[in-house]
Amino acid sequence: MKTISPIEQEVNQIRLAIYEKTKDMTPTQITDYYKQNTEATIQKYGFKVVVNAKTWEKSI
């Protein structure tokens, strides 16, 4: 039997917590949830958000 590492256990707990928060949300609400929760990370690391990969490829 495989032993699950503490890191994998933590990831699974986070995944379940997110599922519980979002399970009754509409697709639009889920999108808004992820946008709100990733904004700080985007700002902190200076990521560029690409809305459409096809449009982004043309701008390179």
Image (spheres, rainbow, N blue to C red):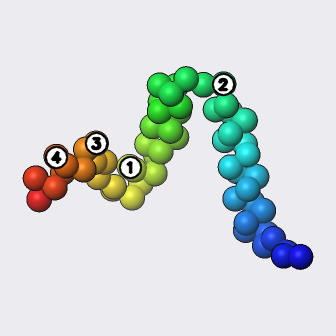
- Give the labeled residue for mark 4: 55
Amino acid at pointer 1: Gln
Nearer-the-camera pick, 44 or 37: 37
Identify the secondary structure beneath mark 1. Answer: helix
Q: Residue furthest front?
A: 1
Residue 24, numbered circle: 2
- Give the labeled residue for mark 1: 43
Identify the secondary structure beneath mark 3. Answer: loop
Amino acid at pointer 4: Thr
- Give the labeled residue for mark 3: 51
Residue under the point 19% across and 49% down:
54
Nearer-the-camera pick, 54 or 6: 54
Camera-near label (2 vs 1) is 2
Answer left or right for 51 relative to 27: left
Q: CA distance from mark 4 to mark 1?
A: 22 Å
Query: Dot 2, how many residues are within 10 Å of its Cα: few (below 14), some (14-19), or many (20+)?
Result: few
Residue under the point 28% across and 42% down:
51
* Image spot of residue 37 (x, y percent): 52, 40
Q: CA distance from mark 4 to mark 3?
A: 8 Å
State whether residue 36 appears in this view.
Answer: no
Residues at circles 4 and 3 in contact by the CB criterion of under 8 Å: yes
Q: CA distance from mark 1 to mark 3?
A: 16 Å
Amino acid at pointer 3: Val
> Image quarter for residue 20?
top right
Identify the secondary structure beneath mark 2. Answer: loop
Quadrant of the rendering where the C terminus is positioned: bottom left
Q: CA distance from mark 3 to mark 2?
A: 25 Å
Amino acid at pointer 2: Asp
